[in-house]
Amino acid sequence: MQKTNINYLALFFLGLILCAACSKSPGISDRESHSAMIAVMDSILIDAKNDPLKYFYANEFRLAYLDSLVQANPGIPQLEYRYAMELQNSRELERSVPILLELADFMRDSVSQRMAHEALAVSYLRMAEVNNCFENYTPSNCILPFDEEAIHKNKEYIQSAIRHLEILLAYFPGDFTHHWMYNIAHIANGTYPEDVGLRHLIPGMQSAEELPDYVQAPFFRDVGMIAGVADNRISGSSCVEDFTGNGHLDIFATSYGFGDQVVFYEGIGNGNFEMRTYAAGLEGVMGGLNIECADINNSGFADVLILRGAWLAQHGEHPNSLLRNNGDGTFTDITMKAGLFEMMPSQVAAFADLNHNGYLDLFIGNESESEWQGFFVEGDTEPRSYPSAIFLNNGDETFTRYQELNGFEIDGFVKGAVWGDINNDGWPDLYVSIMGADNRLFVHRGLDKNGMPEFEEIARLAGVQQPQFSFPVMMFDVNNNGLEDILVLTYDVRGIRLVATEIARERLGMQTVTENSKLLLNMGNETFRDVTAAAGLNTVMFGMGANYGDLNNNGFQDVYIATGAPDLTSIVPNRLFMNHNGERFYESTAYSGVGHLQKGHGISFADFNGNGLLDIYAVMGGAVEGDFYHNVLFENQRSFGNWILLKLEGTRANRQAIGSRIEVRFTENGQSRSVFRTVSTGGSFGANNSRVHVGLGSAESVERIIVQWPGDEIPQVIENPPVNQLIEIIQE
């Protein structure tokens, strides 16, 4: 099999462009930079075709390779099984069944029997999902608890899954993954709980949570198909902004797969969208597991940064893409021109103005040396070094890279990162989530004599090193005391094939073995207190995408977590936790209708239809080509209280006002209240829009809004603004 070295190809294309540029002008033109990046993306696609076993999600290409092996080596059970599993992971799922049935008849030892019947149960379950959730689509499909619409109409495949699960439960009764799948299958079949049997029953799976009367939980319905934003592919991420300047929020979404075109949906009002990908000049811009958005040139239009190569170790030496928003509905890839071109596996990025020069700087987190670095790849898994870096904005659409910078240095398996001001000194601090190692907290200590930012790493002293197996991270004021807290979610890869088992054990009140997430409450002295258990968040997460916002307009920010794992047995619900008075989170996943069983990734909160209620956009789908699902737009359909929406515009500060701190003061039920917010795009996997939504509860007026702009000593005060509308605030 021919192998292609991506680095050489990329350098070849880059060299051609640089030579062409040098012969014409001192720099690279926009068009040359854009064309060069498209060429590099094409070279990666060619590499995947030529050497597909490096990429666990290049299933079409892997299948072609394995097909040739099976044809050349007939009758080898191990090879037949591997071929069937590749079919299961591809869009040719149905072809796996006859092979697995033959193996189940031929292989009589208990291990092989278990493998064959489990694979058959998974194949039939997935075939049932594809048949009923796509061909017989309703907005409630695949959302736990199932309503009458979601019960499978074509029961052939789901009943076949039940038969194979019954074989597994009879011979291997202690496997709680099989218990979970069996209960899910009966729910889809419409025979839960009566036909499950007490021995295998997981109670309450078709019931909503019993919430206290004082917890007001929203109800959502998926309107993604109706709104025209139900992109149907695999895992990826999303960013929401008014990219076109027409006053309506747009959606930019990615998909992880090779050759998966990014998509751009332009908002046209009333929560509806038009697909404008090709009109926006995005043809050939492909892939990306994560995405971040920021106005890097103060044009008034948010630009897009696409992160690539995550989870692939040395095979993920893929470039990120910086897409400049041209302000006319089009984008141009200026990665090379901007000085951001490098071939490293990247999961996360975060923007902040580190030197208060009015331009947004950038942290990019790469997946570097770790024993877990090659967890999902085949072949050479020797740890490689891909240090993370800070890129300072030069103010001319270019950046300067700093791998080490006055106390900053990270060479680890970075999976999440957020900027926030933990000590209210006006400088952005950086929290970094690292897989399989201590997390890091870099406190910004101001500028040195040369105007460069200085950092001090204080994670151990601050008490924020845990959890060890963390992924997405969020920094926001949980209890409205004016201090930013940290919520970091676990993704314990040591139990990556136990996701369904852990969820089943949790629901049965049994002990779980994977690591819990951490809610770390800011104590105001650069230390944090672990309040996870008291806050009701000591649950099994396996969080991937996540974000936060005030979903019931009570002034406190709630959290939605996208869950799952590459394994097709991890059919578990995404989870919603409502924040009550900053004291405790109550799960309202089932009650609110957002317990989607398909794997979730990038999450974005926004009020898409302008009714004062935050909605949720979720990028769905798993890690392999056959684990596709359409993205969902959960529309908030239960009215709550009053609100105010703030759009800030910096003049001395960065124009997008990222990092600005806001206090909204009002009186509710005779009590004075303050709600604190920071202008940001939210969590580290999926991006909210930078408009700031503030719930006011039953308050009918706002006394004042206090804005602390980055770099300003004196705050700006807006007295008696109107409520239940968008307020634009320009820095004075």
Image (cartoon, helix red, strand yellow):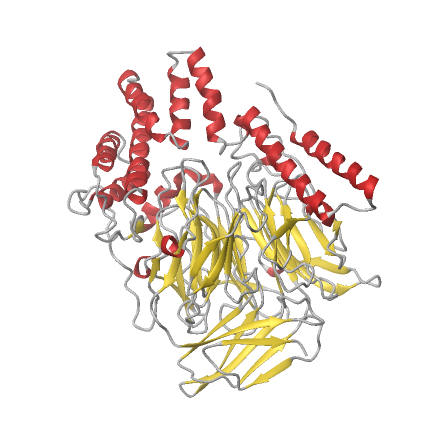
- Is 597 rendered above or below residue 268? above
The spot of residue 70 in percent (x, y) is: 42, 15
Of residues 172 and 580, the one drawn nearer to the viewer in this rendering: 580
Please tell me which residue is depicted at 36% across the width and 30% down the height of the picture: 93
The spot of residue 454 in percent (x, y) is: 75, 60
The spot of residue 525 in percent (x, y) is: 62, 69
The spot of residue 570 in percent (x, y) is: 37, 41
- Is 661 rendered above or below residue 231? below
Count of numbered tags: 0
Tell me, yes or no, if residue 355 can be seen here.
yes
Q: Is residue 86 left or right of residue 322?
A: left
On-image quarter of the N terminus: top right
Of residues 702 and 303, the one drawn nearer to the viewer in this rendering: 303
Please tell me which residue is depicted at 76% across the width and 35% down the height of the picture: 15
Of residues 565 and 605, the one drawn nearer to the viewer in this rendering: 605
Residue 201 position by quadrant: top left
Q: Is residue 486 left or right of residue 353?
A: left
Q: Identify the residue at the far bottom of this view.
A: 670
Q: Identify the residue at the far left of this view.
A: 194
Please tell me which residue is depicted at 50% across the width and 44% down the height of the picture: 255
On-image quarter of the C terminus: bottom right
Q: Is residue 340 left or right of residue 413?
A: right
Tell me, yes or no, if residue 110 can be seen here.
no
